Image (spheres, helix red, strand yellow):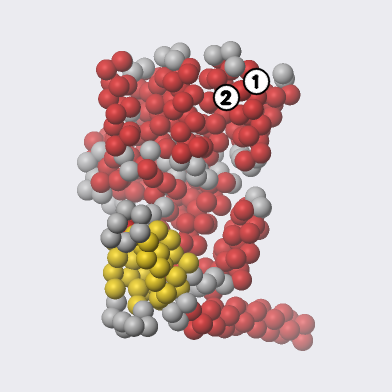
Amino acid sequence: MIELCSQHYRRFTGTLLGLLGALAVSDSIGLADEVVVHGSTSTSRITINCEVLDYTGKKLVIKTAANKNEQTYSAADVVSVRTMHTDAHESGLKALAAGDTDAAEAAFDRAVNQELRTWVRRELLALQIRCSLRRADWVAAGQRFSRLYQSDPDTRHVDLLPLNWSPRPIDTAAARGQAAVWLRDKQQPLTQLLAASWLCFEAKYDAECEQAWPSLVRLPDERLRTLAQWQSYRRRAAVEGIEDTEIARWESRVTKLEPPLRAGPYFMLGLAFERRHEFDLAAAAFLRLPFAHPTDHPITADALFNASVCIERTGLSTEAASLRQELITKYRHTTAAIKAEEGLRKR
């Protein structure tokens, strides 16, 4: 009995100390945040010592010592934001940088429970999504992104939306089961879009996906609508093939997208060029992802692997091997890296 009470006491004091630590960080922040915004010219920068009250995909709200009134800046004008983190938050960042996804995720879970600021909790949620994507846990990534989107529909982390861009369905029973539920829920367009994306090449759900696309490609949210439109082309890109005039239109359209939306469409361009046996153009499209639009989404590693295959098809075996080695080094946690290792062993 005494031992049981002692366990409860340790658990209680541990939780209490965590909350007190979070309060200490919150109190010490005061005006210790540092924000850099664009100035009146294209090259000028303004550094502001302040307290960040909110930071969304649309705006940054701060308060300074000189002006107690709230000041609002467009998120597009923000160059950087620096703030204090809890110890758990810092531990998570270090573990994530070191490639220890499990330790990072555990630390971020602790940090969310300790963090009092809503905008920082959103940043932690984005970091948790990155961990889910690294583990290829599509369901957790989808659930977490749904919470992030509910808190900030204009989130800066739209590049972490766990859509499936490959020409195959997601092959986990948990993801298929969750997607089947989401696909039928028309009141939640974000998760319905994820479901249609995950089940796109599942024959069992073909009819339901086809019924969902007309409403998804007309969603009021411009970014979701744009991604839904590109998603609806996947079968044509990977299976049916694209004619010259249409692929030229795709190339033009993708360059006009805002950068966080480009990774998936470039991947589709790569698939379309690869199917046409235009391997140099396919490799160039695939390489856009790891070098211009990298994220923790598995599509980045897949694109690097696909690029190595396409480059090898052009006869550049040494360059292909170099790309595979880079894939193994940077994205060791992915299935694409495993395939790259197998390819190098067979040389």
Q: Give the residue displayed 53% in from the left and 26% down from the top.
A: 307
Q: Give the residue displayed 61% in from the left and 34% down from the top.
A: 327
**Quadrant position of the N terminus in the picture:** bottom right
Above or below, comparing residue 243 to residue 74 in the picture: above
Q: Give the residue displayed 61% in from the left and 23% down from the top.
A: 320
Left/right of residue 152 with respect to residue 335 in the rendered view: left
Which amino acid is tagged 2?
A: Ser
Marks counted in the figure total 2
Q: In the picture, residue 4 is in which quadrant?
A: bottom right
N-term mark: 1 or 2? 2
**Residue 110 coordinates in the image, percent (x, y):** 58, 68
* Neighbour tally class for label 1: few under 14, some 14-19, many 20 plus, Cα within 10 Å: few
Q: Give the residue displayed 65% in from the left and 20% down from the top.
A: 318
In this orientation, which residue lies closer to the viewer: 75 or 178?
Answer: 75
**Quadrant position of the C terminus in the picture:** top right
Left/right of residue 236 with respect to residue 138 in the rendered view: left
**Residue 336 coordinates in the image, percent (x, y):** 60, 33
Which amino acid is tagged 1?
A: Thr
Q: Distance from label 1 to label 2 (Cα)? A: 10 Å
Above or below, comparing residue 199 to residue 147 in the picture: above
The answer to whether residue 152 is seen in the rendering is no
**Residue 288 coordinates in the image, percent (x, y):** 46, 33
Q: Mark 1 points at which residue?
A: 318
Q: Mark 2 points at which residue?
A: 308
**Residue 87 coordinates in the image, percent (x, y):** 61, 71
Q: What element carries label 2?
A: helix
In this orientation, which residue lies closer to the viewer: 174 or 294?
Answer: 294
